[in-house]
């Protein structure tokens, strides 16, 4: 079992030591003022129109929570500022693209296939597999980081933004080497929908890397329709000159918004993955602690575990309640076992294709098998984590997920050691 607080890399520690020296010397830290960030994005792009102004209130609330709650280190402050400037700049550029090409937002997004479920339940593996079908379309890492101008099919595999994004993603692994064992990121790998919803600032992305309770409490009380409206506009942007037959999309956070998802995409298909919840919450706590520790000096793993389990337990109950109450179409949701996916990934994909009435081609199967060979489990080392490390009480967690475990035939008492 791994114990103690995740340690930042030597690079992160060196940057943060510089931050303490700057503070002692009275040198100003990088600003996270909302107006400063908005002005920086305008200067960077030479544009002024951010589009729908509904983003601004949650953006300002997020910045306030970053300043007040997150305990940002110097590296965390630099990373947050750069990330927010990039997101705001993307808003400006995408709005300008649509002003010059209004047909972008007229594009249909027919029958998208969404993958969701609790984090750490195989959603990334399944997304990577389904994205291999040559006629499907998934948002890749590079184009979600730099969506403007919209990608072109003729240059899709050669776009100069691929190397820019890959360079930045390599830095993430240098700053957080442990992250490589936990979750794959790369410019040409499919990216999840948290990044797609980020420009609306109605997004679960920010709680992953920062402790932002002021923002998160507000966000989880909202109707998520604005989040999915922004999600659809992002897809319309990416598909305008480079469409597929259908979108394959993924985010565990969709469990919080199934009703809004189907309100935006009434013909969507949703695959929901299920795994014994006790190793899930421990693995999720480990992932969150590793990410946050790179950007904050105040992360306590023993508070991260309860925070994550309470949040995602609520989301899981909400998703099941929405299904049981008929707020989402039952025939458009398929439940998939994590065990089945791991034991027989190609067979699981076949069953999903049969349910969704999608032809399963030989080309798709060959590419999926090649993907499995290239991205084998524990390729970069084993992700090790324990239960007690993250302040998780066994009896509390067993009770929290008792009905869920019973409903889907899960053990519900399997503790990671």
Image: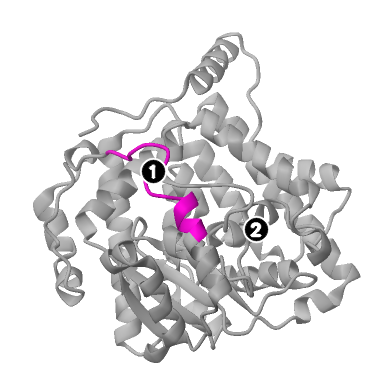
Of labels 1 and 2, the one closer to you: 1
Residue 336 in the image, given as x and y percentages of width and height: 33, 73
Q: Is residue 40 left or right of residue 181?
A: right
Vertical relation: 244 (above or below) 291: below
Q: Is residue 322 above or below residue 79?
A: below
Residue 154: x and y in percent read 83, 63
Position of residue 259 in the picture relative to residue 302 (left or right): right
Residue that protrudes farthest toward the left in the picture: 395
Residue at 62% over, 31% down: 78
Q: Residues within 10 Å of mark 1 (few under 14, many from 20)?
A: many
Task: Report which residue position mark 2 lands on.
Answer: 199
Magenta span: chief secondary structure: loop
Assign the C terminus to one quadrant of the image: top left
What residue would you read off at disc 1? 288
Q: Residue at x 65, y 65 (%)?
A: 54
Q: Is residue 267 magenta?
A: no
Task: Tell me the SS state at disc 2.
Answer: helix
């Amino acid at each position: 079992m791994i114990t103690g607080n995740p340690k930042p890399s030597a690079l992160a520690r060196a940057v943060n030591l510089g931050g303490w020296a700057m503070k002692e010397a009275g040198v100003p830290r990088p600003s996270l003022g909302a107006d400063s960030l908005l002005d920086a994005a305008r200067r960077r792009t030479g544009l002024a129109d951010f589009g729908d102004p509904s983003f601004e209130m949650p953006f300002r609330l997020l910045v306030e929570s970053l300043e007040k709650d997150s305990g940002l280190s110097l590296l965390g402050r630099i990373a947050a500022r750069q990330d927010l400037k990039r997101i705001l700049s993307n808003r400006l550029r995408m709005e300008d693209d649509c002003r010059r090409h209004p047909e972008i937002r007229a594009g249909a997004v027919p029958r998208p296939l969404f993958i969701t479920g609790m984090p750490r339940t195989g959603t990334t593996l399944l997304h990577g597999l389904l994205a291999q079908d040559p006629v499907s379309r998934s948002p890749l890492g590079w184009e979600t980081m730099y969506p403007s101008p919209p990608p072109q099919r003729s240059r899709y595999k050669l776009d100069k933004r691929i190397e820019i994004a890959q360079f930045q993603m390599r830095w993430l692994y240098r700053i957080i080497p442990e992250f490589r064992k936990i979750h794959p990121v790369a410019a040409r790998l499919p990216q999840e929908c948290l990044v797609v919803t980020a420009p609306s600032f109605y997004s679960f992305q920010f709680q992953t890397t920062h402790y932002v309770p002021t923002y998160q409490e507000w966000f989880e009380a909202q109707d998520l329709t604005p989040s999915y409206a922004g999600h659809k506009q992002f897809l319309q942007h990416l598909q305008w000159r480079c469409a597929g037959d259908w979108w394959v999309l993924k985010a565990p956070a969709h469990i919080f918004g199934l009703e809004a998802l189907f309100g935006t995409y009434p013909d969507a298909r949703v695959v929901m993955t299920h795994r014994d919840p006790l190793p899930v919450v421990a693995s999720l706590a480990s992932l969150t602690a590793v990410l946050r520790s790179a950007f904050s000096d105040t992360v306590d793993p023993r508070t991260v575990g309860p925070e994550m389990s309470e949040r995602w337990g609520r989301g899981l109950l909400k998703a099941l309640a929405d299904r049981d109450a008929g707020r989402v179409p039952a025939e458009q949701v398929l439940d998939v076992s994590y065990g089945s996916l791991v034991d027989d990934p190609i067979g699981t994909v076949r069953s999903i294709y049969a349910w969704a009435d999608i032809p399963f081609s030989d080309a798709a199967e060959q590419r999926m098998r090649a993907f499995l060979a290239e991205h084998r489990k524990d390729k970069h080392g084993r992700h090790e984590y324990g239960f007690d490390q993250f302040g998780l009480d066994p009896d509390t967690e067993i009770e929290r997920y008792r009905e869920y475990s019973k409903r889907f035939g899960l053990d519900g008492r399997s503790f990671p050691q």
